[in-house]
Amino acid sequence: MNPDEAKLALWLEDELHGEELAAFETWVAENPEHHAAREEARRWQAMMAAAVPATEDPPYPEFFNHRITRTIQELQPEPVPVSATGSGFSWRSLFMPLAACAGMMLAFWMGGKRQPGMPEIDVTGAPRAIPVEPVLYTPEGGVKAEWFTSLTASATVIVLDGVTAIPDATDFSKTAFLQQAREIDATADLNSEPLSNGQ
Amino acid sequence: MNNPSDDPSKDVREPVGSVVPGDMSEDPDDDFRLVARAQQGDLTSYDALVTRHRGRIFAMIRNMIHQEADAWDLSQDVFIKAWQALPRFEAKARFSTWLYRIAHNTVYDWVRKRKIESVGELNDGIFERERIDSSSFTTPSGGESPDASMVQSELRAKIEVALGKISPEHREVVLLKDVQGLSYKEIAEVMSCELGTVMSRLYYARQKLQTLLKDEYESR
């Protein structure tokens, strides 16, 4: 037997097993010069293995793992409703808009079409909008109220006769809220310096 | 990310040493059990997988690009991409081999992007080992005498410089074979090439490295 280069390379790296190894060992026994090459390979590997670590934990290993987990969680797709996960294509989703359109067209057609058995209605004598006279209510007795309206001016005026005259001295501030500038700043002076402790 | 190396007191790197092929300390069956649960959406199981493999992936990427902060980010990308591709993972290969494959693609995509962004500025310097960052691994591993640690640290520094002088493909095959302990077949899967190509690359990579490290290698 004269093994090929590939088999020799496998033997040099201790990658031959079983019958293949046994057969090769028989051949190597007659060719002892290959033992030196094998020892050379082993010596080289031992030197490399001793000098260069195969395993080296990354800095901050816990953070390393945590970041991977967080990224994976961020990559997870949003939960999809069950109804949408079925076949991916639904005939119902195609027919629903079509059915809606057809329904609308039918409704318009039905609305526009005159029923053959129905009598035609004459609307020429139909009542028009009639101005309604408003009812005026005055809480104070003896007061007469009149109203005047102008369609052209689109205005309505109500005249109250008998209402007691309002004295000039009446203080309207007591009956209506009038915002004063002082009230805004009454509780805080925005330009003042904060008080120190003990003041 | 912020540069984690700013605060050395929080640097908790723990070099464990090279993997002996067939080492059962990380049983692949455990990986498959965790993968099965993670494929059902169990993030806790996936977190356990990350913890089991982050050291190898980070070491591999850092040895490839020799920039710790970028290696940190790229290692994260590897695990995020792995999560996204997890439904397609079949137990035909070891989970770790599959991760190395994703790491391979991630690193080469990153290098390609960097080259495009820096046309005419860096050329092929992205992989150059001369640009080793200040946070390169020089701390001694536990259980060694100070002298032995110093010798190992010096040797590692020299190996890193030598690795920077060979092509990325040669560097990767050496790291996967001699440091990570993958078989030829697994390396072929990771690098997506023929078995013969892996053998050829490893042969020439070792020859060149042994020439570059002649003094250190012959003194051992």
Image (cartoon, coloured by chain):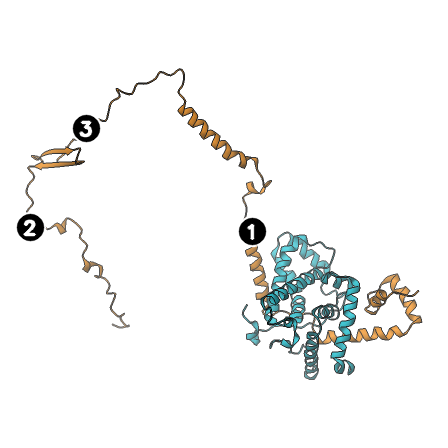
Chain colours: A orange, B cyan
Name the mark nearer the viewer: 3 or 2: 3
Query: What residue does disc 3 label?
Result: A132
| C-alpha distance separating marks 1 and 3 | 66 Å
Considering depth in this image, is B211 or B96 the residue closer to the camera? B211
Same chain for the residues at labels 3 and 2, yes or no? yes
Name the mark nearer the viewer: 1 or 3: 3
Q: Which residue is drawn at 13% across and 33% down?
A: A148
The answer to which of marks 2 and 1 sits earlier in the sequence is: 1
Q: Mark 1 lies on which chain?
A: A
Image quarter for residue B136? bottom right
| C-alpha distance separating marks 2 and 1 | 75 Å
Q: Give the position of the N terminus of chain B as an image quadrant.
A: bottom right
Q: Residue at x 16, y 36 (%)?
A: A153
Residue B108: x and y in percent read 66, 64
Query: What residue does disc 2 label?
Result: A169
Which secondary structure, mark 3?
loop
Q: In this view, does A50 lie to the left or right of B66?
A: right
Can residue B8 be seen by looking at this rendering? yes
Callout 3 amino acid: Val
Same chain for the residues at labels 2 and 1, yes or no? yes
Query: What residue does disc 1 label?
Result: A77
The answer to which of marks 3 and 2 sits earlier in the sequence is: 3
**Is A134 placed above or below B41 here?**
above
Callout 1 amino acid: Pro
**Is B55 placed above or below B84 here?**
below
| C-alpha distance separating marks 3 and 2 | 40 Å
